[in-house]
Image: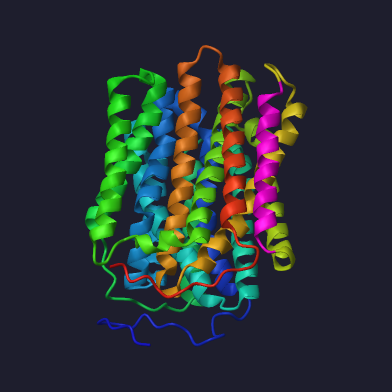
């Protein structure tokens, strides 16, 4: 198969060439590690950032969600560019953008510059993540190899999620919050080195075009949704700005669907969404990210504002929840070979629901020990589900649209994260009873987990699915 482009060919390796050993897996996962580390480390740093930069709670939400906004909105474009130009090339470009933007975050003199730099970080992440899954899809061809690769990919997220709060808290309390971003510089350099050395170039599909009208509609939809949820806490849920943003978000979503229906080369072929496993897996990803990252953001504010914890102590308080991610992902990857993904996804979501419901029912001033098990259940349930949901989506996608399927899955996950953080922050900003708002946020997260479990019953197959013919996109 030829590249069909000028210059050096973006050549795929021969079967088995890349799949020897774990070097390609670790190379690709280094970039994913950096993305997730940044997500979790920032949560313990934002209260300190807010104080040092004199930022309001709404501004702090934008510092957190600015990254998630561009990450979610540009993932489909990242996937399409990977399919068109080669996933390794786009993946490496994303690592460079992310690393340079991290340096800009660390040097930011005020909240505005920091928010803009966070937006740029999200652009880099949107190029990294679709490529990471698509490269694993390309390298590991057999179902057993892919299950192991996706399980370790999920475990890498668990390791980064576990390290993030502790590392972030340690850095904030010792050398300052700016090092939460500077720490990405050596990780980015290592990722580039490993990828260029151990991952060979992937196939290009020069016929794949970037659907810019659809991309603009998607950016508008995510930005308007984030604006509505972020500003509701400051202005109220019935404020004209909030209602207008919510209404325009719906309009932008409809325009996106219309454009994809009419486009000859859509960013997201709507025929992909006719696959129940693929569409259902994407919805599950949205819901569990909404619940888990909403919980982490809300809990971080709760521990520092209500309990008076330092950043490091907050990281230690959150550690049991995120540490479960590493264990649960590895366990899920092993069990899925025997049970299939469906029972694991359902079990994970039910465990997560029980955890957040336990926090919501714990009372107005519970001891930390009472909150420990609920947080651990949420961390375990989310990561226990992640491997199965990832494999369900990627197995249902044809190889020609692996990047698009990966981008769809991660777009819905990041939209869920942005919505969870924005809703949690708005509930806290608009209420006189801080603790009561925390409990309400946890109850809403528990409901999201339950809905995800119901979707899994309907959409996740009992046995691995095989992709059908590639969608035409007509």
The x and y percentages for residue 62 are 39, 33
Quarter of the picture holding the N terminus: bottom left
Residue 68 shown left or right of residue 385 in the figure = left
- Asked if 413 appears above or below 270 in the picture, the reply is above
Secondary structure of the magenta portion, mostly? helix
Q: Look at the image and give the residue range highlighted in magenta.
A: 340-362
Residue at figure coordinates x 28%, y 21% from the top left:
240
Residue at figure coordinates x 33%, y 65% from the top left:
81
Q: Nearer the viewer, residue 465 or 126?
A: 465
The x and y percentages for residue 449 are 60, 41
Quarter of the picture holding the C terminus: bottom left
Q: Is residue 323 magenta-colored? A: no
Q: Is residue 322 visible?
A: no
Q: Is residue 376 visible?
A: yes
Q: Nearer the viewer, residue 5 or 283?
A: 283
Residue 75 shown left or right of residue 299 in the figure = left
> Quick one: which residue is furthest to the top in this view?
432
Residue at figure coordinates x 62%, y 25% from the top left:
303
Q: Is residue 355 magenta-colored? A: yes
Residue 291 shown left or right of residue 86 in the figure = right
Q: Nearer the viewer, residue 444 or 20?
A: 444
Residue 26, picture quadrant: bottom right
The x and y percentages for residue 8 are 31, 83
The x and y percentages for residue 373 are 75, 35
């Amino acid at each position: 198969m030829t590249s069909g482009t000028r210059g050096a060919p973006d050549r795929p390796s021969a079967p088995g060439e890349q799949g020897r050993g774990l070097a390609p897996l670790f190379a690709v996962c280094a970039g994913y590690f950096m993305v997730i580390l940044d997500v979790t480390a920032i949560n313990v740093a934002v209260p300190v950032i807010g104080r040092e930069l004199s930022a309001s709670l709404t501004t702090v939400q934008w510092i957190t969600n600015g990254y998630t906004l561009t990450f979610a909105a540009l993932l489909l474009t990242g996937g399409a560019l990977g399919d068109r130009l080669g996933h390794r090339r786009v993946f490496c470009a994303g690592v460079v953008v992310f690393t340079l933007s991290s340096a800009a975050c660390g040097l930011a003199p005020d909240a505005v510059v920091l928010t803009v730099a966070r937006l740029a970080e999200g652009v880099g992440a949107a190029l990294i993540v679709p490529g990471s899954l698509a490269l694993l899809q390309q390298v590991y061809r057999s179902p057993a190899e892919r299950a192991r690769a996706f399980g370790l990919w999920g475990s890498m997220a668990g390791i980064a999620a576990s390290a993030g709060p502790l590392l972030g808290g340690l850095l904030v309390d010792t050398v300052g919050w700016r090092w939460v971003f500077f720490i990405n510089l050596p990780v980015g350099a290592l990722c580039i080195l490993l990828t260029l050395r151990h991952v060979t170039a992937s196939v290009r599909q020069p016929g794949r075009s970037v659907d810019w009208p659809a991309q603009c509609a998607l950016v508008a939809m995510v930005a308007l949704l984030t604006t509505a949820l972020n500003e509701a806490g400051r202005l109220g849920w019935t404020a004209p700005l909030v209602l207008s943003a919510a209404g325009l978000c719906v309009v932008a979503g409809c325009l996106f669907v219309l454009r994809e229906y009419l486009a000859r080369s859509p960013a997201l072929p709507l025929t992909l969404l006719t696959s129940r496993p693929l569409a259902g897996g994407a919805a599950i990803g949205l819901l569990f990210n909404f619940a888990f990252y909403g919980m982490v953001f809300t809990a971080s504010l709760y521990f520092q504002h209500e309990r008076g914890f330092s950043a490091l102590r907050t990281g230690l308080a959150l550690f049991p929840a995120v540490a479960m991610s590493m264990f649960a992902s590895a366990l899920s990857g092993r069990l899925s070979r025997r049970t299939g993904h469906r029972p694991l996804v359902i079990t994970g979501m039910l465990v997560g629901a029980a955890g957040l419901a336990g926090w919501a029912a714990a009372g107005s001033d519970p001891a930390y020990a009472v909150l420990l098990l609920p947080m651990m259940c949420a961390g375990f349930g989310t990561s226990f589900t992640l491997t199965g949901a990832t494999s369900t989506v990627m197995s249902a996608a044809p190889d020609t649209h692996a990047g698009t399927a990966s981008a769809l899955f991660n777009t819905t996950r990041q939209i869920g994260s942005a919505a969870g953080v924005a809703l949690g922050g708005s509930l806290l900003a608009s209420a006189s009873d801080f603790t009561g708002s925390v409990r309400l946020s946890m109850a809403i997260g528990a409901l999201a987990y339950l809905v995800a479990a119901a979707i899994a019953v309907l959409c996740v197959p009992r046995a691995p699915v095989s992709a059908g013919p590639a969608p035409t996109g007509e």
